[in-house]
Image: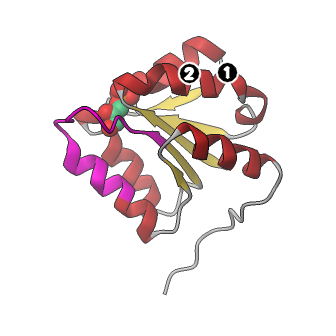
Amino acid sequence: MNVAMIAHDQKKNDIVYLAIAYQNILKNVNLYATGTTGLRIAEATGLHVHRFQSGPYGGDQQIGAMIANNEMDFVVFLRDPLTAQPHDPDISALLRLCDVHNVPVATNMATAEALIRAMDAGLIDFKPKVRD
Ligand SMILES: O=C(CO)COP(=O)(O)O
């Protein structure tokens, strides 16, 4: 199970809270993250996180590549809806790829918690996606 965790700066504390609260579940998956988010999660939890570039430097696109390669099962992307991001096209592209490949993606805390619990309960079908 490969899970990506990404958060904009104003949401970093939230994603750290999420990782701490659910670390007993997240320790059983392969965690991927953009650079700074991954560092914050690793420091706070001790969990191993595969870290990509920081988002504005290509991290979103690197995670997008995993989605396109059918290698990502679940994405938590806590976006900041109140601050303009210089790499907005990359953010849109990542979310678009989640929809193209039918990958569950949570963009706020409420959905993230619901999906992590659903994942733990085996309620989400994470089988490899079938494409035409
Ligand atoms: O900008 C981001 C996602 O679009 C997140 O990048 P960082 O985790 O490196 O801050």
Q: Nearer the viewer, residue 106 or 6?
A: 106
Q: Name, please, the residue furthest toward the bottom.
A: 132
Residue 33 image offset from top left, x and y in percent: 47, 34
The residue labelled by disc 1 is 20
Number of other residues with Cα within 10 Å of mark 2, as a class: few under 14, some 14 to 19, many 20 or more: many
Q: Is residue 50 above or below residue 114?
A: above
Name the quarter showing ligand 1.
top left
* Residue positioned 46% across, 58% down in the render: 67
> In the rendered view, would you say 100 is above or below 78?
below
Indicate the quadrant where residue 85 lies: top left
Task: Looking at this view, name the residue that lies furthest to the top.
Answer: 43
In depth, the one of 66 and 79 nearer the eye is 79
Indicate left or right for 16 with 83 as reference: right
The residue shown at (20%, 35%) is 84
Q: Where does the magenta region start and end?
A: 77-95
Label 2 secondary element: helix
For the view shown, which residue lies furthest in the right direction?
A: 121
Read off the residue under disc 2. 16
Label 1, label 2: how far apart the Cα atoms are: 6 Å
Q: Is 51 colored magenta in this rendering?
A: no
Q: Is residue 27 above or below residue 120?
A: above
Q: Position of residue 78 (x, y in %)?
A: 45, 37
Name the amino acid, label 1: Ile
Residue 53 visible in the picture: no
Q: Amino acid at mark 2?
A: Val
Secondary structure type for disc 1: helix
In the depicted structure, whether residue 28 falls above or below residue 38: below
Is 83 on the left or on the right of 71, as rendered? left
